[in-house]
């Protein structure tokens, strides 16, 4: 009986190791994706700031 429990424990441990490896790989992929998206996010933020600046300049001109 004890031998059977040890085998089950080892099988569970192996399953957890595999799952852990898959999760580490997923994290690595997500980090790479995040880094690859960084320039796009920066560009989108810059465009948004430019639009807001133009909007503020237009509002200011209307008050002159």
Image (cartoon, grey):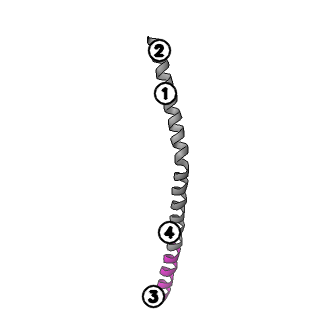
Numbered disc in front, either 4 or 3: 4
> Which mark lies nearer to you, 3 or 1?
1
Q: Distance between the Cα atoms at labels 1 and 4? A: 45 Å
- Residue sitting nearer the eye, 36 or 27: 36
Residue 10: x percent and y percent? Answer: 49, 81
Dot placed on the residue nearer the N-terminal end, 4 or 2: 4
The alpha-carbon separation of the residues under discs 2 and 3 comes to 84 Å
Mark 1 Cα shell of 10 Å, populated few (<14), some (14-19), many (≥20):
few
Q: Which residues are magenta?
A: 1-15
Which mark lies nearer to you, 2 or 3? 2
- Rounded to the nearest whole Å, what is the CA distance between mark 4 and mark 3? 27 Å
Of marks 1 and 4, the one in the foreground: 1
- Residue underneath mark 2: 61
Identify the residue shown where x is 52% and y is 28%.
Answer: 51
Number of numbered tags placed on the structure image: 4
Which residue has dot 4 on it? 20
Q: Please identify the dominant SS of the magenta region.
A: helix
User: Mark 2 or mark 1, which is nearer to you?
Assistant: 2
- Please tell me whether residue 44 is drawn above or below residue 1 in the rendered image: above
Going from N to C along the chain, the mark reached first, 3 or 1, is: 3
Q: Nearer the viewer, mark 4 or mark 2?
A: 2
Earlier in the chain: of badge 4 and badge 3, it is 3
Q: What numbered label is drawn on residue 52?
A: 1
Closer-to-camera residue (10/18): 18
SS for tag 1?
helix
Judge by depth and name the residue closer to the eye, 4 or 16: 16
Residue 6 lies within the magenta run: yes
Instruction: Tell which circle, 2 or 1, labels the residue nearer the N-terminal end.
Output: 1
Q: Residues under labels 2 and 1: Cα distance?
A: 14 Å
For mark 3, what is the residue? 2
């Amino acid at each position: 009986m004890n031998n059977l429990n040890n085998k089950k424990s080892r099988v569970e441990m192996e399953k957890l190791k595999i799952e852990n490896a898959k999760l580490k790989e997923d994290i690595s992929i997500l980090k790479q994706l995040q880094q690859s998206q960084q320039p796009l996010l920066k560009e989108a933020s810059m465009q948004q700031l430019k639009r807001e600046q133009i909007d503020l300049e237009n509002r200011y001109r209307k008050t002159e």
